[in-house]
Image (cartoon, helix red, strand yellow):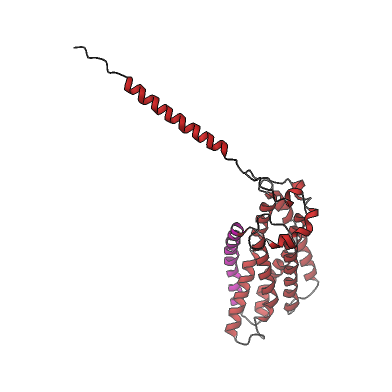
Amino acid sequence: MIRKCPSTEGLEEESSIDFSEEEDKESELKSKSESVEVRAPRSLSLREAVKTIDFYLLFIAFFLNIMPVVLLTTSSKIFGIKSGFDDKFASDIATSTAVFNCVGRVWWGFMVDRFSWKLPMLTYTAMWAAFFVTFPYVVMPYVTDDMVARALYAIWVFVLFFCLSANFVVVAGAVTRIYGPANMATIYGLIYIATCPSALITAGVVSQFDITGQWIPIYSACACACVLSLTAVLFVRDLKPRVVGFTNNICAVLCDPCRLSILEEGKIYDEA
């Protein structure tokens, strides 16, 4: 028996419906993609960056912050021993600072992502100044109880190193936010050059004097460097500030004549 060939009309109709549905979806996606503008990062070149006052303000702030870094890392253990603590205790505290240095980098990085860069930078420089200027007074003979002095010394050292870690995180975030991501590494590298003259000058000055026992002048000088750094940061414009946006209208606006128009208008990122 010869069977009748099955009809293909239904299949043709289904396939035509499927193709039409796919075409409709493609056209819909295409129209949506055309209606959405991509916000492309607008990065400044190295030449444009060095023409702005913000580059030199960040350089000065970084230069000033390296002085406390050098003095803290070289003197904190000696200060503890000369204050009456045994070598083992001072060594244990010095070793433990690595933990706070590492944790601090993560914390300050999170703060930059959450609040932009200016608030974290003002916060850690202010904290640094406060803890430096009070550091010589948390040990004997100013604190008579040995256990209390040990606890205060440990807390102050840990907080100081916690703030120290912010130097190498927040400035990198500031460069990215101000100048865009394309040339961030090169621009940050130029600002990082400030560590060389700052460390050499600090080491040269300290080598001319016997700093043992001169803890109040040393740590007061560190606090002064932090205050000067904080002052320089106030005049840097944060394009997307949180909480401290008023500093743009009070301090940063004074330096607008020395900025490129693109920084004045806050157009590092093209508006969609």
The correct choice, above or below, for 87 with respect to 120 in the image is below
Q: Residue at x 73, y 71 (%)?
A: 222
Which residue is at the front of the view, 28 or 117?
28
**Residue 141 horizontal/vertical position (percent):** 67, 86
Magenta stretch: residue 108 in it? yes
Magenta stretch: residue 181 in it? no
What secondary structure predominates along the stretch shown in magenta? helix
Residue at the far top: name it: 2
**Residue 47 horizontal/vertical position (percent):** 77, 46
Please state if 113 lies on the left or on the right of 19 as rendered: right
Total number of numbered discs in the rendering: 0
Residue 153 seen anywhere in this rendered image of the structure: yes
**Residue 223 horizontal/vertical position (percent):** 72, 72
Q: Quadrant of residue 65?
A: bottom right
Q: Which residues are magenta?
A: 89-114
Q: Residue at x 71, y 49 (%)?
A: 186
Please state if 147 lies on the left or on the right of 71 as rendered: left
**Residue 104 horizontal/vertical position (percent):** 59, 64
Q: Residue at x 60, y 75 (%)?
A: 155
Q: Quadrant of residue 209?
A: bottom right
The correct choice, above or below, for 142 with respect to 130 in the image is below
The quarter of the picture where the N terminus appears is: top left
Residue at the far bottom: name it: 144
The correct choice, above or below, for 20 with respect to 39 in the image is above
Residue 166 seen anywhere in this rendered image of the structure: no
Q: Quadrant of residue 234?
A: bottom right
Which residue is at the front of the view, 250 or 97?
250
